[in-house]
Image: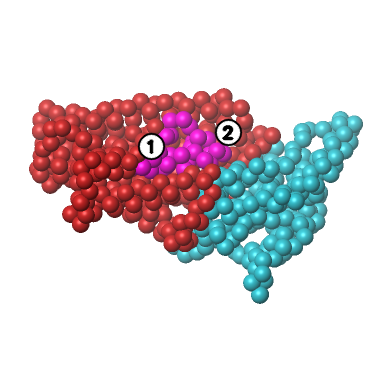
Amino acid sequence: MPDYIFFYGLGIHELGKPWGVAIATYLFLGGLAGGAYLAGYFMSLLKTKTEFTRSVENFGVISSGIILITGLMSLILDHPNVIYAVFNPFLFRNLYSWLALGSWIILLFLLFWFVLVMDLRGYIKIPGKWKLITGSVNAFFAFMVILYTALLLRDARFVPLWTSNAIPPLFIVSGISTGLAACLIYGILKVRGSDVRIKKADVSLIAIELLLVGYFLWDLGNISSSADYSFVRAGAGASLSFMISGTFSTMFLAGFVGVGLVLPLIFYSISFFRKTEIVEILSAISVLAGGYIFRVVIIAAAAKAIVLP
Amino acid sequence: MPLKFLMDVFHSPCIKCKGCEAICKNQNDTPEGVFRIRVVTINEGQEGQINIPMPCLHCNDPPCMKVCPTGAIYKRSEDGVVLVTKDICIGCGYCATACPFGAPQFRAKGAFGLDGKMDKCTFCVQPYNPEDASGNEIFRDPKSRCSMICPTGTINFGEQADLAKKLRERAAEKMAAGTLESIFIFF
């Protein structure tokens, strides 16, 4: 007997409430914010600094909080009652829930970010050693913000797509990669130059991402064929066919893998040999577009099957 | 003893009369678009078509309760009924992604967003608006109307041990007659 499938995302659903594009936007901006902060933080640790690294350092730190707040706005637009929790954060008291834990992580990240921005803008002065400590602690929170966007999905254990072991590393690598891409765009536009280290880092992350995508598809195929329960197999199989040959295959294969991973690799490769700003900007934009499409597909292709004995 | 539903769709097939949906709406005043119970069909129009009434099954370890960030979902210790404190529900929809049965319901409200408060089957303990005119929370005796009206006996409601006994008796009858297909039980 085929299992009854519940589809979530982008309006295809039978029961309950879907998470749609607004949640995908929130997850993307969360990853981008964490990535941008980490990019800025790593720039601050470099020994040989240039005008480019200095501008990217400031941009990464300052933009991260703004991007994250924009993501929260997207969430609130979709789920207006969440605004009550913004005014009363102590509502988030079930710390077994990643949504509650993540909210506290975001709050702590934004507090540290605010202090760092005050320092960067010259309103307060943090001594050098303490500035490094504050920045490092917030780098940890930035990493946790990215990780939280993946673990948030993983808590829904009846959606096999979201429980794949590939999702957390994919979200982390994609988040940092998009953050680097955003910083690269800003740097190129601001100082009309770039840094080969950023490009090399982004190329490495994209290569890792491609490997993780392969592992992700293999893992999902494995779940759909050999999971213990029929409803898990059915849900994983439905999600996989959605992404490979079904409704969202163009978005996943052409949008995420093609535009988001393969195209920037080609563009970056060209830019190593022939330095053109437009190619570098295009590659970074492709990374950003791919990262967003990836989140949309992950939400849209999430399927779960009715639990049958 | 925990109260449970038993959906016996093989021994007493659901005919999709939707009486359960109608009486649930009437009893609990749920608004348009909110279904505390809904009949879903597997293999529609094909061999092996089967209808299953889907309410909240008041799990022993509810995944919705685990993921709820505000702790609005709780399980009553005395009878195991899973209820929602609507005052502190923020309508994030996390419970809907976690529930394997699609039980959590949200009322749509305009182009953006939803009404916010999650609603689900309460064994008819609480209506959609859980407060009376003077603002006190309503707690009625758990007595599911859907099981009362079900004409085929698909939906059974009661204490877990009684339901298990009932199912065993039905299965034994079918086995004696040589017509036992499968045991389909939701606890």
Verify whether residue A147 appears in magenta: yes
Res A94 seen here? yes
Colour seen for chain B: cyan
- The residue that disc 2 covers is A232
Query: Disc 1 is attached to a residue of which chain?
Result: A
- The residue that disc 1 covers is A171
A108 and B107: which is toward the camera: A108
Residue shown at 43% from the left, 62% from the top: A87
- The answer to whether dots 2 and 1 both sit on one chain is yes
Verify whether residue B32 appears in magenta: no
Q: Looking at the image, is A224 positioned above or below residue A97?
A: above
Tell me the kind of residue under disc 1.
Phe
Image side of residue B149 versus residue A122, left or right: right
Tell me the kind of residue under disc 2.
Val
Q: Label 2: state its secondary structure.
A: helix
Q: Label 1: state its secondary structure.
A: helix
For discs 2 and 1, the disc positioned in front in the rendered view: 1
A76 and B38: which is toward the camera: A76
Colour seen for chain A: red
Residue shown at 52% from the left, 60% from the top: B116
Query: Disc 2 is attached to a residue of which chain?
Result: A
Residue A89 in the image: x percent, y percent? 46, 56
A131 and B18: which is toward the camera: A131
The stretch of residues the image draws in magenta is A141-168
* Mark 1, other Cα within 10 Å: few <14 / some 14–19 / many ≥20: many
Residue B15 in the image: x percent, y percent? 75, 49
Image side of residue B175 versus residue A77, left or right: right
Disc ID at residue A275? none
The tag earlier along the polypeptide, 2 or 1, is 1
Res A288 seen here? no
Image side of residue A276 versus residue A76, left or right: left
Q: How many marks?
A: 2
